[in-house]
Amino acid sequence: MSEDTAPTDFTYQPSPDQSAATPVRHPVVIIGAGPVGLAAALDLAKRGRKVVVLDDDNTVSTGSRAICWSKRALEIMDRLGVGDALVEKGVTWKKGKVFFGEEQLYAFDLLPEEGHRMPAFINLQQYHFEAFTVREVLKHPEIDLRWNNRLVGVDNKKEGVTLTLETPDGEYRLAADYMLAADGARSTTRRLLGLDFKGQIFKDRFLIADVIMKADFPTERWFWFDPPFNKGQSALLHKQPDDVWRIDLQLGWDADPEEERKPEKVIPRLKAMLGEDVEFELEWVSVYTFQCRRLEKFRHGRIFFIGDSAHQVSPFGARGANSGLQDIDNLIWKLDLVLSGKAPESLLKSYHEERAFAADENILNSTRSTDFITPKSDASRAFRDAVLDLAREHDFARKLVNSGRLSLPSTYSESGLNSPDSKGFIGQMLPGAPCADAPVTFDGKKSWLLHHLGGDFCGLYFARSDETAESLAQLRGSLAALEVPVRLVPIFPPGSDVPAGALIDSAQLMAEARYDARPGSFYMIRPDQHVTARWREADPQAIRGALNRALGKGLVAAEAEAEQEGTAA
């Protein structure tokens, strides 16, 4: 099988678990083999964890569905071994144009600076994303991927979860220490537990059409307000691989979803946009409604909700699947440490706290985009159109135009896992922030910083140019002796005499621009490549305290203190 293809259909195979007299127990069971569930399984396998993945179908998704994958999502998938395949197949882009009527208002560049391994975004159909990820999953014996296993019952107890599954060979039961619900917006797990979303459903409908055609549009995101081919509404155009183009057309709330899906309704709309003479064929058509909603809690006992099963946002902004991948990036390292007994159960509580914060951030951005794209009153439309008029000439107005604020990773600035920040630092790499990538040199070869961070706790140490191997060995030894070892990642300025295993800040982007680092600065990095603490000098005692907080031990103390206050009251 060539590198740019991957399997798409799979065969049901019965498991020995199905004939067991009592439910076989597994550490982790994942419901759903979509992008989020598959990525979660890979992350667990990379840590040596056995995991069962159950899907009610035996194919990858139909239709392109999610297509727009952000830089941070690609960095996560790169750590999981799939990044290069996704980028190679995907359509890389970072520029876009915004139109009002027939006139271009302005253009934008989402990643104007150099020195990043991953692009700002790629466009890649969800079925390709899933197929490449399944191909990687099949390389890992730790992952038991079972097709045509439909969840029909869940018993969520304090000591674990028992699942009832329906297969072509009948029903059987399975037990799990923890269960991850990655079964999407129509989550069966959510329904079986009687849970529902809280939030807003917007009264508007949009047509998605994936169109196969050869066209000379540039590889950019084009968004129209009030285009001549869809008067009074909006439109979006994106290029995908294999000559597939994504077109979104606003329809209005009165549109009949069933009627609007019919080719005899879709084709005239597309011809009005593309021209009567343009040849195309429909690959996939859907009609959707904007929704900005989430579960009140992402954790229910031993069950964790991840991805669309936990939260939903409107498609403009690419905040759905990208946010789901950040969910697993946040959860899996915590689950691994708790399963290994290296962190208290309280660490798992931080999953909801951090990712609910991120979901609220996404919902806020998505709601604002929706309100701007689809104004619901004459006054709001007049304001929107006035902003668009001003954007022709004025930069300040362009900042108010909202055609979908595109996905960015969240900074957990208020997380209880962070340590108080040291004085004197500036810039965006504060505790809670995802690490920025940068080019480095490693063993005389070009490399990237993020390839040397993540998976475990790391100490990013900005070494002095005259740092000795002995002083590094002493610091490395103190970090290795911690209850959960912190791996030292020393980085030197250009021109230094570098010991083996150290990095060189080859482009001077690290110290000068991205990390505000000076000789001696020390950043402690979580396994998900988020900063958890930083100091101007490496202090073993401070590092130990910061590690305890990052392991959730500070949350245990806070709980005990709250319990004492409650007893006293």
Image (spheres, grey):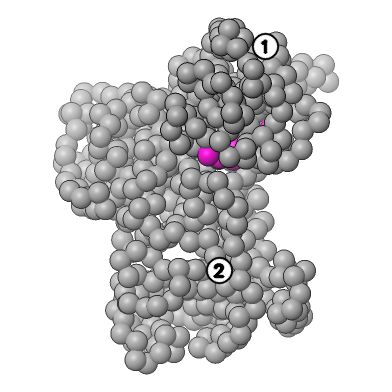
Judge whether residue 271 can be spotted in this image: yes
Which residue is the extreme one toward the right? 569
Front residue (pair 21, 449): 449
Which secondary structure lies at badge 1? helix
Q: Please, is residue 11 above or below residue 123 in the view?
A: above
Residue position for label 1 = 540
Q: Amino acid at mark 2?
A: Gly
Q: Could you say where residue 490 lies in the image, as x and y percent from the top left? A: 57, 22
Q: Please, is residue 359 above or below residue 107 in the view?
A: above
Residue position for label 2 = 96
Q: Could you say where residue 150 lies in the image, as x and y percent from the top left? A: 29, 45
Crowding near the residue tagged with mark 1, few <14, some 14–19, many ≥20 C-alpha atoms within 10 Å = few
Instruction: Check if mark 2's residue and mark 1's residue have beta carbons within 8 Å.
Output: no
Residue occupying the point 45% across, 68% down: 219
Residue occupying the point 71% across, 28% down: 518
Q: Please, is residue 229 above or below residue 238 in the view?
A: below
Residue occupying the point 68% across, 41% down: 513
Which secondary structure lies at badge 2? strand
Is the C terminus in the top left, top right, bottom left or bottom right quadrant?
top right
Q: Could you say where residue 63 lies in the image, as x and y percent from the top left? A: 34, 64
Crowding near the residue tagged with mark 2, few <14, some 14–19, many ≥20 C-alpha atoms within 10 Å = some
Q: Could you say where residue 176 lies in the image, as x and y percent from the top left? A: 37, 27
Q: Main secondary structure of the magenta part?
A: loop
The reply to whether the magenta stretch includes residue 257 is no
Mark sitting earlier along the chain (2/1): 2
Front residue (pair 57, 482): 482
The range drawn in magenta is: 431-439
